Every structure is written in C-alpha cells, then in structure tokens.
C-alpha cells in the first residue's frame, strides 16, 4: 500500500546527504550525490526493480511488465538540488514513483508495459552551469562539448564523471529510443502559489514554459566620482538600472510573461569610481514561444536605444533558449481522469519552472502532475508540503500508472 509516511521519511533521509551543514545542498557527482544514489538504488530494489547507475550518473530502475522487454512508461525527477534548497524539489517525484512501483509489486501486479523510474543526476545545473545533463543524455541530446564544462574549482565534467567511477565514452548508450518510451510522467512540487490559493492538493500541468537567457555587457567610461561632471559621464551602472526597470515594465505587460534580471556585476566596483562596465543577465519565460520572442526582441531594442542615448556600448549574447514543452493532450486527459477518480477537482496549470520533460519531449510525449507546496515557496529551505498532499499526489500518480493506456 502507498505510505505517505514513508514518502516523507525518505525525503527527510535524502536531505541528510548535504554538503551544507544544517541545510541542503547536493550537487552533481559529489560525495553526497553518491550517498543519495545508494539510498535510492536500495529503495528501487526493495520495490522489485532492477536498478543501476547509468553512464551520466542517473539512478535508473526498471520494473518489468507482463513479460520482459516491453516498452516502458517512464517516471522520474531529479536528485540534485540548488544551493540551500528544500527537501522536495525533485526528490518527491523520485520517491513517489518508487512508492507507486512498490505498491504494484507488493500486490504482484504486472502491467502491459514496463515501468522505469529515473532519478536524474543533474537537472539544476548548479555545479557545471549546464542544466538537465541527465535527461538530455536519456533523450540523446547530450552535447559532448559539455564534458569540458568546468565547476567553480576548475574540474571538468569529464574528470568528475571518471572520478565518480563513470565512463564518459558510454554516455551515448544512455540514449533511449522513441519506441522504447511510451510516455514520460513526472510528479513535482508546484513551486508556485496557484494550487494553494485554490485549496487544491494537485494540478495537471499543461506545458512547461519556454525561456530565453541573455547576458548583457554595458561599457561606459570609468572615472573619478568627484571630478567628472554629471553631464559628461558615461555611467554603465546607471544605464543598467534603467535596463532593469525596463525589463520589469516590458514583462509586466502580459500576465503570461515573466522577466527577471537576476545577476548584475559592476566594475571596477569602488565607492569613489564611476562604474565603467556592467554585466547583467536577463531571464524571460512564457507559455507561448511567440510571446517570449516578442518580449526578448523588445528588451533588446530598448536596451540598444537606451544605451545609444547614454553613449554606452552594448553587447547582448544569447546564453540559452528552450522552447515551450507542451504536455500531450492524451496524457493530460488520462491525468485528469486519475485526479477526478481521487475525488479531486481537476485544475490545469502551466509550469513556470523548467523540468526534465523539456529534454525528454524529444523521445516521448510528456505529462506532469503538480503537488501543492506551502506558500508556493521553493529553492529555499522553507520549502514544505503536507503528508496529506504527498499522499494525494502519489495516489493520483498510481491511478495514472495503473490505468495508463498507450495512444492509439
Ligand atoms: Zn525540480
């Protein structure tokens, strides 16, 4: 039987494997990552699965269907965290999926398809600055240039994989083919306040919003804060300040858009020097690609115009861009039915945060189920869910799995 108590306990257990004393930070290929993997491998085996670590460091478990070798319904989420993270972002999806398999196994139930549960090693991208390394490898979209990405200590991903006992040469073997994966379904905390506001424990995700990330470099002229008159200045930080407010204004124009300047560095960075150079980032997200593109173009235009007026040189680089990952209609319909069968109101909502499904959509249709989290808070030690909601989520997921029908 499903045990919400065990789900909560296992999230607590995983949270103990942290490099941050008294908090939770667990990055890809760290000793804490290894310890968490061992726990999850053990739980998978207890739940009747064959489980192993793959070449990119994902924990992968398989529960055969009515006969061995059938295509699978893939379930999963990630086991890495951001810095000073909460206990549920990622881990809840892995632990809940294992709980569902355990429930089937304990009742000797085999389905007309296999189940696979994957605990992705890297989704957040904290250590090497590149996100979704684990799911991109599974989707066959792993970029080998990423092996040369370095962590803050200067160690390459390739070296870190080898030191972890993995063989980077074998990463292409992690790729799954389209026909092997019938669908990918992920349970995840909402990371937003919508479900809480409506008094609902779960929601069915319609799409994972796309995002665009820019790096903007403004070059003005550094100078003495006491001697250069205001009208002769080319202050890069003052220009950046206008840019930050402009991004906020442009993004606020449409309720579906969000825009953020999350990082800014001014140099030389002294109290008595006019800032000569500023680098800042822009992150724009939307549930529709055209909307996001038009926002990014407007932001680019406005930055250029504003800098021209201030005689500031500007360079705008595209850092990363991912299109919207829509959840498949046929899977949403099945997830809706699972929610309704639990006596809950069906609420559909988009995901503002990125998830592994963005990578996996290349090989399979995707579905997601959100579980309410307190105050919509995530990426924060205050992240919290109730045992009742964990139970509701797991029950819906189990219904979805048990009643899963392949398309066609
Ligand atoms: Zn997550």
Image (cartoon, grey):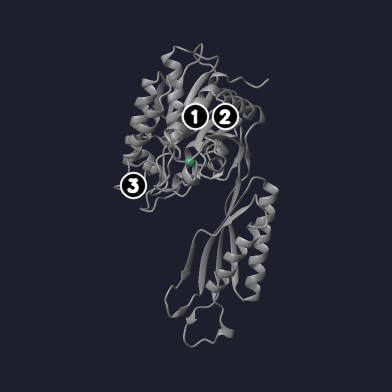
Tell me if mark 2 has few (under 14), some (14-19) or many (20+) residues whose alpha carbon lies within 10 angstroms of its own: some
Question: What residue does disc 2 label?
Answer: 344
Going by the picture, which residue comes out furthest to the left?
21
Question: What residue does disc 3 label?
Answer: 23
Nearest to the observer: residue 341 or residue 250: 341
Against 295, residue 240 (above or below) is below
Residue that appears at 39% across and 47% down = 381
Residue that appears at 45% across and 21% down = 101
Depth check, mark 1 against mark 3: the one in front is 1
The residues tagged by marks 1 and 3 sit, at their Cα atoms, a distance apart of: 27 Å
| Mark 2 vs 1: CB contact within 8 A | yes
SS under mark 2: loop
Q: Label for residue 392?
A: 1
Against 21, residue 207 (above or below) is above
SS under mark 3: loop
Residue 80, horizontal then vertical, whole percent: 41, 41
Q: Earlier in the sequence, mark 3 or mark 2?
A: 3
Q: Quadrant of the C terminus?
A: top right
Can the viewer see residue 261 in this picture?
A: yes
Tell me if mark 1 has few (under 14), some (14-19) or many (20+) residues whose alpha carbon lies within 10 angstroms of its own: many
Q: Label for residue 188?
A: none
Can the viewer see residue 59 in this picture?
A: no
Residue that appears at 37% across and 41% down = 29
Nearest to the observer: residue 234 or residue 241: 241
SS under mark 1: helix
């Amino acid at each position: 039987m499903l045990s919400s108590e065990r789900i909560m306990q296992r999230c607590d257990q995983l949270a103990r494997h942290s490099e941050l004393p008294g908090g939770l930070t667990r990055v890809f290929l760290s000793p804490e990552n290894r310890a968490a993997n061992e726990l999850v491998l053990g739980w998978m085996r207890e739940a009747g699965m064959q489980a192993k670590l793959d070449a990119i460091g994902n924990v992968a478990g398989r529960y055969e269907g009515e006969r061995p070798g059938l295509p699978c319904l893939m379930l999963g989420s990630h086991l890495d965290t951001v810095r000073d993270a909460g206990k549920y972002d990622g881990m809840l999806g892995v632990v809940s999926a294992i709980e569902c398999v355990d429930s089937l196994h304990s009742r000797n139930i085999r389905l007309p398809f296999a189940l696979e549960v994957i605990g992705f090693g890297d989704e957040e991208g904290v250590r090497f600055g590149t996100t979704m390394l684990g799911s991109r490898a599974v989707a066959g979209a792993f970029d080998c240039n990423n092996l040369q990405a370095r962590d803050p200590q200067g160690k390459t991903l390739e070296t870190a994989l080898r030191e972890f006992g993995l063989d980077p040469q074998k990463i292409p073997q992690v790729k799954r083919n389209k026909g092997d994966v019938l669908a990918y379904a992920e349970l995840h905390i909402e990371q937003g306040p919508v479900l809480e506001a409506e008094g609902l424990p779960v929601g069915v995700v319609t799409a994972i919003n796309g995002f665009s990330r820019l790096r903007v470099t403004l070059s003005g002229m550094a100078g003495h804060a006491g001697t250069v008159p205001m009208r002769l200045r080319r202050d890069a930080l003052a220009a950046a300040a206008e840019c930050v407010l402009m991004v906020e204004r442009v993004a606020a124009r449409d309720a579906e858009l969000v825009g953020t300047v999350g990082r800014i560095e001014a140099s030389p960075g002294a109290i008595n020097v006019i800032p000569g150079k500023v680098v800042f980032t822009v992150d724009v997200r939307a549930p529709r690609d055209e909307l996001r593109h038009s926002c990014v173009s407007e932001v680019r235009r406005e930055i250029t115009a504003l800098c021209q007026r201030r005689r500031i040189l500007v360079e705008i680089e595209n850092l990363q861009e991912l299109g919207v990952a829509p959840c498949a209609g046929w899977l949403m319909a099945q997830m809706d039915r699972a929610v309704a069968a639990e006596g809950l109101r069906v609420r559909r909502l988009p995901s503002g945060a990125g998830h592994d499904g963005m990578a996996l959509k290349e090989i399979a249709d995707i579905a997601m189920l959100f579980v309410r989290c307190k105050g919509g808070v995530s990426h924060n030690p205050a992240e919290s869910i109730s045992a009742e909601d964990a139970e509701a989520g797991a029950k819906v997921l189990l219904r979805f799995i048990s009643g899963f029908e392949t398309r066609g």
